[in-house]
Image (spheres, helix red, strand yellow):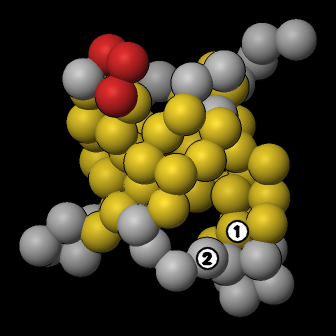
């Protein structure tokens, strides 16, 4: 389960950065994106999906633990 950084780029898009892989992708969809609940399944521009345990909407940038969607 890698630690990832999520932030907004200059264009206002969410980006998902995995330091261990030195990979940064645009977030295409986020399952929960409200002040009360933020996170869940995250789909990236390259087609991969990760899961972030939902939390109240944080201030960005934030570093969280994420796991590949579908992993046990």
Can you give x and y, in whole percent of width and height, for residue 13 in the image?
28, 66
Q: Which residue occupies the foreground of this view, 37 or 60?
A: 60
Residue 62 in the image: state x and y as whole percent: 50, 61
Residue at which label 1 appears: 38
Q: Which mark is residue 52?
A: none
Check whether the beta carbons of the residues at disc 2 and disc 1 lie within 8 A of each other. Answer: yes
Q: Is residue 32 above or below residue 4?
A: below
Residue ID for mark 2: 58
Q: Position of residue 54 (x, y in %)?
A: 80, 58
Is 4 in front, or is 69?
4
Residue 41 in which image quadrant: top right
Q: Residue furthest bottom?
A: 35
Q: Residue 42, can we see it?
A: yes
Query: Mark 1 falls on what kind of element?
Result: strand
- Side (left or right) of 15 relative to 68: left
Query: Above or below — where is 57 with respect to 22?
Result: below
Distance of label 2 from label 1 (alpha carbons)? 8 Å
Depicted 30 relative to depicted 1: above or below: below
Q: Position of residue 24 (x, y in %)?
A: 25, 36
Quadrant containing the N terminus in the rendered view:
top right
């Amino acid at each position: 389960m890698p630690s990832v950084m999520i932030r907004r780029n200059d264009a206002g898009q969410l980006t998902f950065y995995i330091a261990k892989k030195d990979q940064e992708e645009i977030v295409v969809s986020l399952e929960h994106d409200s002040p009360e609940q933020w996170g869940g399944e995250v789909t990236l521009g390259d087609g991969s999906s990760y899961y972030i345990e939902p939390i109240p909407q944080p201030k960005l940038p934030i570093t969280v633990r994420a796991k590949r969607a579908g992993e046990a």
